[in-house]
Amino acid sequence: MLLSAEESQLVLVDYQERLMPFIHESESVLRNALRLGRAAQALQVPIWGTEENPAGLGENAAQLKALCRETLAKMHFSACADGLTELLRAPARAAQTGNARSLPKHLQKAPAPQRNSIVLAGCEAHVCLMQTALDLLDEEFEVWVVTDACGSRSERNRDAAFDRLAANGAELLTTEMVAFEWLRSADHPQFKQVLSLVK
């Protein structure tokens, strides 16, 4: 089964300024997250962010946060407990300000098609990312974890998270795998732009 851009949403979990200096290979993890986010943006894949206790851990890296439609502040380790599931399932907003139901039928937008493939990357892999992924699986989303854009303070914790996620039905892949599966073909109009991100 290949990942489809039209069915995907990207969630960037907790790349926060006071956490990242302690993450194993943090520069590489953050660089891959940026590549992933820019590829998603080029291919019109919705991007969401989360921040764990932002008052204590700070905000996400500014370049990443700028790519996100919304960044969810949370206190639970799983972002689902603080509203991520509802964000991922929210219907399209009305064409104009106000309640869609108060508009005439011809001006109301149909609900957005469900994008059930959730591409996840973030920190720490064995805490917030893993708990969010497991809850999304319980909610019957397809979960795809981008391993080279995930990190923990230790390799052992990161790798244990990947083992557990795979055993529970998450697909593990890399930034380049995501980009090329979203593209599917060198004929894609955004091929050169996305290729420049992964080179």
Image: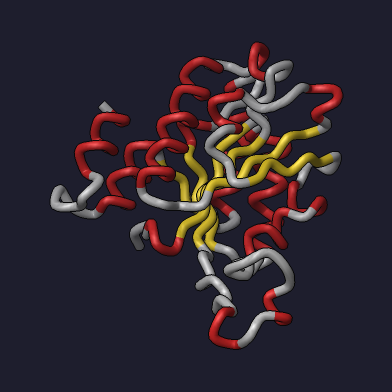
| Picture colour scheme | secondary structure
- Which of the pair 78/44 is nearer the observer? 44
For the point 67% across and 13% down, the residue is 22
Residue sitting at x 65%, y 45%: 70
Q: How many marks?
A: 0
The image shows residue 44, relative to residue 21, as above or below, that is below
Q: Is residue 99 left or right of residue 40?
A: right
Residue 3 position within the rendered picture, expressed as x and y whole percent measured from the top left: 38, 57
Q: Which residue lies most toward the left here?
A: 187
- Closest to the observer: 36 or 46? 46
Percent position of residue 86, x then y: 72, 62
Q: Considering depth in this image, is 168 or 82 the residue closer to the camera? A: 82
Seen in the picture, residue 125 relative to 6 is either above or below; the reply is above
Question: Which residue shows up at 54% across the image and 55% down it?
Answer: 118
| Quarter holding residue 151 | top right
Q: Position of residue 154 (x, y in %)?
A: 63, 20
Q: Please, is residue 151 above or below residue 103 in the view?
A: above
Name the quadrant containing residue 91: bottom right
In which quadrant of the rendered image does the N terminus lie? bottom left
- The quadrant in which the C terminus is found is top left
- x 51%, y 52%: residue: 46
For this orientation, the residue located farthest to the bottom is 105
